[in-house]
Amino acid sequence: MEPLTVLRPLDAHAPYDVGPYRLLAGLGSGGMGTVHLALPPGGGPADLVALKTVRADLELEGDFRLRFRREAQAARAVRSPYVSALVAADPDAQRPWLATEYVVGPALDEAVARAGALPVPVVRKLGVALARGLAAVHGARLVHRDLKPANVVLGAHGPRLIDFGIAQAYDATALTATGIMVGSPGFMSPEHVAGDRSVTAASDVFCLGAVLCFAATGQGPFQDSELAAVVHRIAQGKADLSLLPDELAEVVGACLHRDPARRPTTGELIRALDPAAGAPRPGASPPPPTGPFGWPDGVRTVIGEYELAVGRALIAPPPPSAPPTPAPPPSAPPETAPAAPGPRRSRRLRWALGIGAGLLTAALAAVLVPPLLPGAGDTGNGAGASPGAGAATGAAPGSASPRNTAPTEPDPAQPAAPVVTSAMTDFGPGARDRNRLPEGWSPWSSSFEDAGEPLECALGGKALVCRLHDEDRRLLWLEARDASDGSALWRYPAKGAETGNASVGGLDLDGRYAYVSAADGEGFAVLSLDDGKQVAELPGRSGYLPTRARVHEGQVFTSYVETDGEGSSTRVLLRAHTLRDGDREQQWEREIAGVFPQSLDIVGDRVWVDGPTGSHALDRRTGKSLAEVPDHCRLPARGARHALCPDGVREAATLKEVSGARVGSPSAVSADGLALHRGEGLREGSPYLEAVDLRTGRAKWWTPWTPGDPVLVAGETVLTLKGSGARLLALDTGKETRSQSYNGWPRGRTDTAERPTTVMLSGGALFATFADGTVLSVYAP
């Protein structure tokens, strides 16, 4: 097979972001615009989108935006597991853009070119799925109009139609005159060729027949070296089906009938391809896939390569056009290439999976929180934060807005604050209790060694531990700071001992120890929070890479990814150890195929994992499955009680249906299921934060908000950060109850406050890290 080249690095001319989306890689370009892989703020791998922008040099006619808007509104109504849904669009932007669900996998044309023509049974399943997708598109009063192999993407769970409906808006200028062809030669209907305005659902069926012929033979039914000959053969209905297997000839030939009225409907086509399948009922959603689609081995291999490529894109260095990392003296960072993959597959997986130990999940701030952008509403007037530990930077109690109240003195009798991590969004009702501050705490600012950028952090006891990487993301290490004053405690591995092939990640704490995938080995290192020395090791297994650790009530759970797996067939090893008197005894282990090792989490008394083949809730005492569904659900935050699934919301512990709410990628979720996410469109001309009850799907309140600004929950309050200021809102109403501004907040080149990469709330204090290596702790409002 030829090497994969579908994900292209962003070039110097690519925008850093479009709308609320951060661009990760290039996917392609065409006559009307470019397509990028992109991620929304707070998003995980399930939220990746294919983001299309109209070319800047195009002269858009006056009614283009109106038609674009109408098509986008209509496309939102399409709900089908066989169609890549429209996620967002902005026809009023200077360069109109739209975002659709990104399917991890190759287009049909690439899959056939690399893995060969598909077997007849697979072609039948493909045809049924695409016909169901077309039925949903037609049910929304849309016509695809450009159905071709390049617009059929093969994911692990099945095929998806892309570019539906929107093509009408993109090609609207071509429809202003009769006789203009719109479509792709070789996969157009006679109506397309004639430039007829009456391109209908039957035209899509014709194109589907051509696509199925290609899937089964490797070439279209009208293939010819001369374009004029292709057009003539389509117009005359002269399809070449000589290479088509006999089992498919009749049904494909019916689709390719010259007369639209004599072509089968999508329902008839479904029954012809699979007599046991029922035709889609008008207005009814087609049945979702129930497991892996059953692609041939060659196609599964290509899908696996795509998954690895997407993983690399998520941890790739920022593009050259990205806002420069602030560091005195001001100078643009050098353009460096990512580390080249090692010669063995295990090395590649260390880069794509192990190195991040959170690469494809919502836990990593490097992916979830967009790189720093200029802040707004900054009321601070301090210069950049001092690099020395112990410099007071937070506004002292009473120096904030008049609504603030002074903190109470810490009470030694109060229990210590629980362990918190940057993967959390609800820090609990005690997070603002200043009696739980570390002993001797006062506001402080410091910076990590080598100005490493923090990717994820955890706070336990008196230690603030973060996983960092260097500027070109080749080295990773842990660094611990004293949570009371910011002074350095330890570094793991020792400076100079890091390696770009080490999977230092999977960080979690239990108040006394840090658990992290070993810098040199197949297991997890257990480090003392006092000095960072390794006191124990949880052994791994040959052929597996350590990925994530989770500690919960006397148990530590670990996940490992198989180094020789391909795509959704990758096996994940899960283990549970008990913690008694310093001993760590293995309790159980289990292997599950087709899940993400980074999805490991604990929900109540259940162990959670999810991936393309399904979602699982296991008994944390035995590892036995207690609940599972074939859908790829995900937890919106660490320990969340509700899971977001393709069909709505489910209880994470039981996977029972709760509601049909759809909230995309929430910035925060409260313990009782209030999701705080970016609302659709604008309110009063601006983006806004909307609170939706996941249990009912009802919106409760909204407030103006800049997408990407951190949102935290603590008991009955919501805290939002903007620039160098913070607002406190009532969780039930969204009403502002308190605000505070800070001096000494890190500032960028434009002299505006930077946005944190990670934020935690504990003991009434904020602990925040920034891309330039700054780390600070200040009073929360």
Image: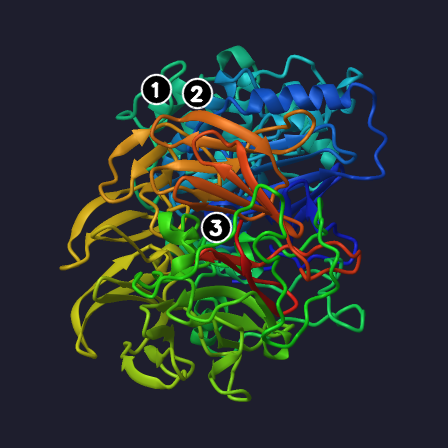
- Sequence-wise first label, 2 or 3: 3
Gap in Å between the C-alphas at discs 1 and 2? 8 Å
The picture places residue 715, in percent across and down from the top left corner, at: 38, 43
Identity of the amino acid at label 1?
A: Ala
Q: Which mark, by number, is residue 266?
A: 2
Gap in Å between the C-alphas at discs 2 and 3? 32 Å
Identity of the amino acid at label 3?
A: Pro
Check the image and report above or below for 469 versus 494: above
Q: Residues within 10 Å of mark 1 (few under 14, many from 20)?
A: many
> Do callouts 1 and 3 mark residues in contact (Cβ within 8 Å)?
no
Q: Residues within 10 Å of mark 3 (few under 14, many from 20)?
A: many
Quarter of the image where one finds residue 530: bottom left
Determine the secondary structure under disc 1: loop
| Residue extending furthest toward the top | 261
Residue linked to disc 1: 279
| Foreground of the two, 541 or 650 | 650
Quarter of the image where one finds residue 508: bottom left
Q: How is the image coloured?
A: rainbow
In this image, 370 relative to 576: left or right? right
Determine the secondary structure under disc 2: helix
Residue linked to disc 3: 45
> Do callouts 1 and 2 mark residues in contact (Cβ within 8 Å)?
yes
Check the image and report above or below for 731 versus 261: below
The picture places residue 405, in percent across and down from the top left corner, at: 52, 47
Q: Name the mark nearer the viewer: 1 or 3.
A: 3
The picture places residue 591, in percent across and down from the top left corner, at: 24, 62
Visible residue check, residue 106:
yes
Name which residue lies at 79% across and 17% down.
Answer: 176
Tally the marks: 3
Name which residue lies at 78% across and 23% down.
Answer: 173
